[in-house]
Image (cartoon, grey):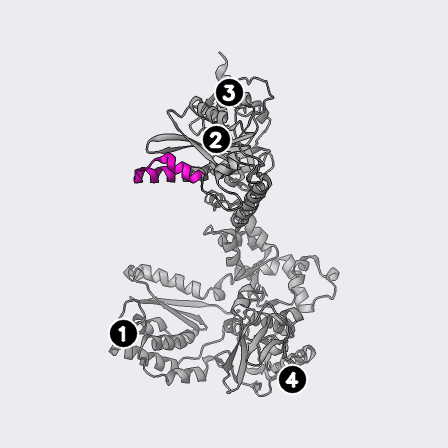
Amino acid sequence: MESLGVIERVQQPTEWVNSLVTVVKPNGKIRLCIDPKDLNRAIKREQYPMKTIEEVISRMPNAKFFSKLDATQGYWQVQLDDESATKCTFNTPFGRYRFHRLPFGISSAPEVFQRIMSQIFDGNEGIEVIVDDLLIWGETREQHDERLKQALERAREAGVKLNKDKCEIGLQQVTYIGHTLSSNGLKPDVNKVEAIKTMDTPTDKAAVQRFLGMATYLAKFIPKFSQLAAPLRLLLEKNTAWHWDVQQQNSFEGLKQTITNAPVLKYYDVNKHVTIQVDASPDGLGAVLLQDERPVAYASRSLTQTQRNYAQIEKEMLAITFGCERFHDYIFGKKSVTSATEVDQDLKELNSCIKEGWPTDKSKVPEGAKPYWNYRDQIIEQAGLLFKGNKVIVPRVLRSETLKIIHNAHLGIEKCKRRARDILFWPGMNAEIEDLVKKCQVCQVHQVRNTREPLHPLDSPSRPWEIVATDLFELDGSSYLILVDSYSGFFEIAQLTGTKSSSVITHCKSQFARHGIPDTLISDNGPQFASHEFATFAQEYGFQHTTSSPHFPQSNGLAERYVQTAKNLLKKAKQAGTDPYLALLAYRNTPVNEKLGSPTQRLFEPKIIEPKIVKETLHKNKEKQKQYFDHHTKELSVLQPGANVRYETNTGLKAAVVIEKRKEPRSYMIRTSNGFVLRRNRKHLYESTGMNRLENCDLDDDNITEYQPPHQIPIAVGRQQNGLEPGQAPQPPQLYTTRSGHASRKPERFQAN
């Protein structure tokens, strides 16, 4: 291999090193492969469509003469670039080597090789290729010989080497991909039939699985296969003890005999009428695809325990559904797509390019065919239909109906795309599917919630008591107020006699008298903090009051986190019968780490611990926290004023319109369908592109009396400043608190008298 230039020795370090695996080929020779498990997980696969034997034989209904060509050492004919070769480095007892040719074991290797071979040989009728096996067929000897000549010329031009020992030329019967092709039709490979005939009676479940696996490969040749195999399948059911009785022996022998005498199946002809016959037995379903009253393929399956309880008429309907689904590729769109293709002007021009040959320059391609330029090597015409690989090209007139069928189960965008990409194609199909799903009202109502956005941490304080977070919590029927210093992590707890603003303000004043007035106080949007009384307190004491968005406690995460700590300390002290204040003292004097010291040290002895070190450490901690948090997050798009959205409620998503984006990160003011103005975080807002939207929204409507610009509202309705200059007394508006907790002003029409 080294002398042939397939591999070379590697001396330098490489990022990837794979294990070596040897496989014995049918001729007894050794094949060297690699086992790149980790590399395969990192490779981006091409997802190129692999041809199937069913697809191939559907294009040769009247074939009489055959030739089979084999690309010798197929994968090794594909040259790797230097970067790919280095990734294919492998270990041996003699040192490390790397492949210069495409090795066996790479997950994308079959798709890469299939694409290259298709580019070389596709486009000529009567030449089919599945990986490294070429099939040439013709209805007459002359037609076959001409096609064989074309295939050999293509191979010579592309430098494809063929294995003369495996080539079969000008025969009326060849074995191809496990099937025997002849002028009479399709038969199972004689070698596979012989292997099944000589299998010994199974002695355990593993042997039964092997037998059924081989037999299932030939199931299309066996009428009522599922019914014949039912006694053997029972042995594979969970909690079934191994036993081999007369039923199993009869099933085993019957399957072997049926496979030995398997009928010759007719080649499928796209131009002929199709008949599907189905049958339902108590334990299974059967179907057969017929043309000219000759079988093209058989199909069957067993019934589940629930389906066995169906009425017979229900089983018959289930059999019809099963037959249509199993033979979907043969019957779907058989008439409508063909007739629509004939009148579609773009597809007429595309078909003309296929038959007459593509121009060498894209500028000379007819306008209707230009969107297909990049796929020109993959597009073929067969019986009036156009295909890209094995996918039907849908005419323009049928695309709207096709989109509805794709989305009839209201699957998400990606699932609809995957469903369509299996069998359909037209330029821009993915974009049209995405637009359809986004505009679907049902899908919008039941839309998956927004993903998390990247963390937006607060600025790190430079001194104690600069930024303080506060919150209320309940424990054992009592209400508590907590204040947390962002710089030191030192927190104070006060038991409240009431939860009104006056009680909260009194305890805040007490703590401010002890520690000083903070520059910024962060709280949630509760009525105690959103009141006019608290706004006056903030203005008089001269601190900036910031509140989190409603239903988004993450904005006040510091206080929320220390509420958990405080609750745990109080619960444990009560259960242990110890003094809760001693628990608080112990917590405050416990060092966080060597750099930060204890909360008490950072609060009362800032000179012992350099503020610069504290700030840098806090900043690093926040960066690390952000790094962990930001996994699997993404930034949501910015919403513009006037944008139609849906916002989360306890009863689902409801329509609203964006009024403005606030200065605070990811915070918006919205107007609901009933005229209320709310503040919501971007996480709770969903863009509305379909029918579920507010129409004729006028953001300057005089009737929107609930909304005022933020600088005119002297209360905290979000992360905002109070908007009052020092010394300016706030003017209380006529506000009321709604059941949802937000402040609103009554419309003037209610105050006329």
Q: Can you give x and y, in whole percent of width and height, for residue 413 in the image?
A: 52, 52
Q: Give the range drawn in magenta.
A: 567-588
Q: Is mark 2 on a helix, strand or loop?
A: loop
Between marks 4 and 1, how big is the CA–CA gap? Answer: 54 Å
Pointers 4 and 1 in contact (C-beta within 8 Å): no
Q: In the rendered view, would you say 495 is above or below 413?
A: above
Please identify the dominant SS of the magenta region: helix
Query: In terms of sequence position, does the residue under pointer 1 or pointer 2 come before the other?
Result: 1
Q: Can you give x and y, in whole percent of width and height, for residue 384 in the image?
A: 58, 65
Residue at label 4? 3
Q: Is mark 3 on a helix, strand or loop?
A: loop
Given the image, on which type of amino acid does mark 2 rest?
A: Asn
Q: Can you give x and y, in whole percent of width and height, for residue 265 in the image?
A: 45, 77
The mark closer to the camera, 3 or 4, is 4
Between marks 1 and 2, how big is the CA–CA gap? Answer: 66 Å
Side of 575 where 561 appears, left or right: right
Pointers 1 and 2 in contact (C-beta within 8 Å): no
Residue at label 3? 747
| Count of numbered tags | 4
User: Quick check: is 580 in the magenta stretch?
Assistant: yes
Q: Residue furthest top?
A: 753
Q: In the rendered view, would you say 273 is above or below 738?
A: below
Between marks 3 and 2, how big is the CA–CA gap? Answer: 23 Å
Query: In terms of sequence position, does the residue under pointer 4 or pointer 1 come before the other?
Result: 4
Given the image, on which type of amino acid does mark 3 rest?
A: Pro
Q: In the rendered view, would you say 248 is above or below 627?
A: below
Query: In terms of sequence position, does the residue under pointer 2 or pointer 4 come before the other?
Result: 4
The mark closer to the camera, 3 or 2, is 2
Between marks 2 and 4, how big is the CA–CA gap? Answer: 76 Å
Residue at label 1? 242
